[in-house]
Amino acid sequence: MSNNVNNPTKVITGPNTRWSYCNAWEAKAINGGTPKFSVSLIIP
């Protein structure tokens, strides 16, 4: 039995992506919540 899965999700990274709102070195809390590490990627 073949188990073929069609996954439409594609991850794009490379020299044209940029980090925005980078909290990679210090965790930050939002609205008094648990501090977490995060980053937003800008992909053209």
Image (cartoon, helix red, strand yellow):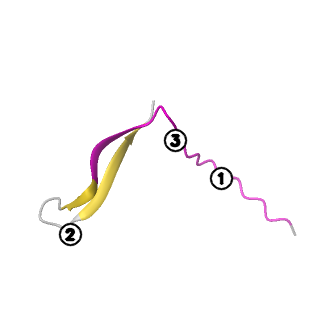
Query: How far apart in space, not on screen, are marks 1 and 2 (Cα)?
Result: 33 Å
Q: Residue at x 70, y 53 (%)?
A: 6
Query: How far apart in space, not on screen, are marks 3 and 2 (Cα)?
Result: 28 Å
Within 10 Å of disc 1 (Cα), the crowding (few <14, some 14-19, many 20+) is few
**Quadrant of the image occupied by residue 1:** bottom right
The part of the chain drawn in magenta is 2-23
Please state, as top left, top right, bottom left or bottom right, where the C terminus lies in the image. Answer: top left
Marks 1,2: beta carbons within 8 A: no
The percent position of residue 4, horizontal first and vertical second, equals: 78, 59
Q: Which residue is mark 1?
A: 7
Amino acid of disc 3: Thr
The percent position of residue 33, horizontal first and vertical second, equals: 17, 67
Within 10 Å of disc 2 (Cα), the crowding (few <14, some 14-19, many 20+) is few
Q: Which residue is mark 3?
A: 13
Give the dominant element type of the magenta stretch: helix, strand or loop. Answer: loop
Q: Residue at x 47, y 31 (%)?
A: 16
Amino acid of disc 2: Thr
Q: Name the N-terminal-most of marks 3 and 2.
A: 3
Q: Is residue 44 left or right of residue 4?
A: left
